[in-house]
Image (tube, grey):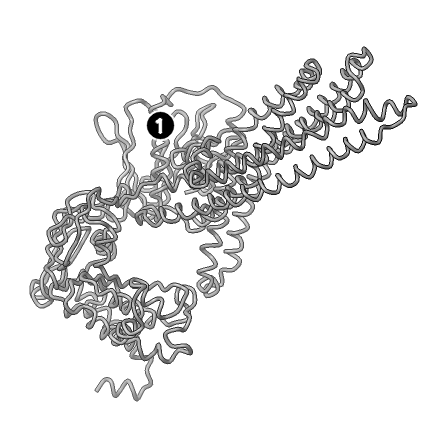
Amino acid sequence: MSVEVSLQHPRWTELQARLMPHENVVAPLEVDLDSQTRFARGLLVLTDRRLLAWDPATAQWSDWALTADLRMQISDHAGVGSLELLNAERRLALWRFTLEMNLPAQRWQDLFTRRIEAGAALAHAPSEEAAETEYCPSCQAPLPPDSEECPACARELHQPPSTWVLLRLARFAKPYQGQLLLGFLLMLGSTGATLVAPYLSIPLMDRVLIPFQAGHQIDPYLVALILSGLFGASLVSWLLGWAKTYILALASERIAADLRTATFEHLLSLSLEYFGNKRTGDLMSRIGSETDRISVFLSLHALDFITDVLMLLMTATILFSINPWLALVTLVPLPFISWMIHLVRDRLRTGFEKIDRVWGEVTSVLADTIPGVRVVKAFAQEKREAQRFREANANNLKINDKLNKTWSLFGPTVSLLTEFGLLVVWAFGIYLVSKQEITVGILTAFIAYIGRFYGRMDSMSRIVSVTQKAAAGAKRIFDILDHHSNVPEPVNPVPLQNCKGGIQIQDIGFRYGNRAVIRGLSLDIKPGEMIGLVGHSGSGKSTLVNLICRFYDVTEGGIRVDGIDLRRIGVADYRRHIGLVLQEPFLFFGTIAENIAYGKPEATRAEIVSAARAAHAHEFILRLPQGYDSLVGERGQGLSGGERQRISIARALLIDPRILILDEATSSVDTETEKEIQKALDNLVKGRTTIAIAHRLSTLRKADRLVVMDRGQVVEEGPHDALMEKRGAYWRLYEAQVRRVDTDSEQVLPMLPPNLNAHTAQ
């Protein structure tokens, strides 16, 4: 719940009048249920001294001083969340909310706990900033002055990236160390060649031009020799520069490609839980744009930086060899530039990470909207989605503008300091010439070298920006690579040979975050048995299936297949024996044949056709323009729901699994299509251990056993007829569904033509 919404609460003005002098609101939280779980707008307000609460049931305010013995406990049950205020002796208050409020409530409770731990009961001295406090739109905590970073959300955000994270790219660079070494040697030679020209200006000035002005003849041989040296140095510098740029660019592109591949492969190895907390656009941005940014940094900016360092070292060596005192004067601006770089580095580092995050939000809006454009248009929500993009883009612009304030001042200031240094060198050099301690040629060469020295220093200062960008991008990538799957591979996997499909579930428990979904569930499924899972929405059916597929690991108990604990079997080895048919089948962009053979890419055309025939898909596939080679649109949009489902069944048939999972496979199609799919399913389930979820209980008549679930537990199990005779939970589900069907029929009947109504009544 955002702060803006809380500020619109009807009791907000009343709250302001209840605040003590100099008491500041830290974080408000609006709860949407009263103590009897009826919808009502309650309000909790955490200040720097107290906790205040408005109870809509009693229409009363309550408050508690923030003392060290207070604690706030959050929990949820059956779709209702609770916040309990407790002290050392008893519960002081209880507030309820729907799970839509769960995340804001967790953040608010976390902020409350940390304020108690920090001794927040002490009154704070009034400050001018307090009146202008801004709040985090996510968790309602106060933001520090001149910052978009929320302290309350700090645990969810990673630490600011360090430049040292770029050194972690070394393991990706190791295979190309030969190319990198060659590139470095070429860079060394190219940089050295560029320093020849200023040095040759000394004899050109002192032995040719100045003597000529004094009336002496020009030595053509000497001039030709000097000009040849200048031409040769330029040619060698160009040739070596081209070679080192090309070689290092090839190496950096390959490093970035390996990084991109490693990141994507590691991403695929992570459990579904990781993807549940991430947005598609953000992950696409990390693997795509961040690796491109690193590639550009390695191939261009890192190359420039190394060249700049070499140029500075070589130039400094030459300057000190020519005149040590003049060289020391050259270094006057260096401490100031170093201090400025240190000053802005942290701001740039955190700023670029924020930019990466908000750009991920922009990409996420695109990733949400473009695939769902049919729904957007169906509900005429184009303006709404455009507004979402506009807001995300405006936030991106805001963060960039703030960073540009720092960067726009930094660059010109460095240039000013280098110009000042050049002026000092001119002044000191003229003084030395007047004292005849150096010649005009030496001063000219010095100025040429100084121009390059300060130019490289200015370039090095500007590379701070791109380095911090690359560091922020590298950190976002390594955040993926450092994440360990919650479904780990066993150290010594046990091979699953000749899988029979027997599943033993022993007193398992599972939690989503702090919400218990499965509790003490036990079930024994025999090889080849068909089990039907039934129950109300939210009873834990799909979660149980996910645990059997090992998309998640149980938090308590264990699941065994053929007597082997799932956690001891290799994930890929186990899943090769599982066929999955979902309610919404997902097809990839490609041909019909490629989609059917997705689980078995080496399948022959005869095997693909055989699977399609068994899935009752062969006939409609032949009616397509290119048959099995017909392209389906993204996510199979070129096919109907029933056609996509039958291709999904063919895909499962082709791999010949021993364990079959059917998750609402016929719930979203019409009756005729359901009949076709049911025929395909009859072929699919033969001889396989099958676990089927269906809301239409009539589709589970052929199940050997029905398992009724409620609140994450098995409450009944047995054949249909036995459960109906028992008149328990299954009987109530069945009767409720029959009554709903009868009601729907009665509502449809009066809409039929009169003669058809009469005929039907007879």
| Image coords of residue 700 (percent x, y) | 17, 68
Judged from this view, the residue extending furthest toward the front is 221
Q: Quadrant of residue 31?
A: top left
Q: Residue at x 37, y 37 (%)?
A: 107
Decide: is 592 above or below 619.
above
Picture coordinates of residue 162 (x, y %)?
A: 46, 31
Between 717 and 363, the residue placed more toward the observer is 363
Residue furthest to the right in view is 215
Near-viewer residue (513 or 276): 276
- Position of the C terminus, as image quadrant, is bottom left
Residue holding disc 1: 114
Within-10-Å neighbours for mark 1: few <14, some 14–19, many 20+: few
- Tell me what residue is drawn at x 33 percent, y 24 percent: 117
Looking at numbered disc 1 in the image, what kind of residue is underneath it?
Answer: Arg
Quarter holding the N terminus? Answer: top left
The quarter holding residue 757 reads bottom left
Residue 92 seen anywhere in this rendered image of the structure: yes
| 756 lies left or right of 524 | right
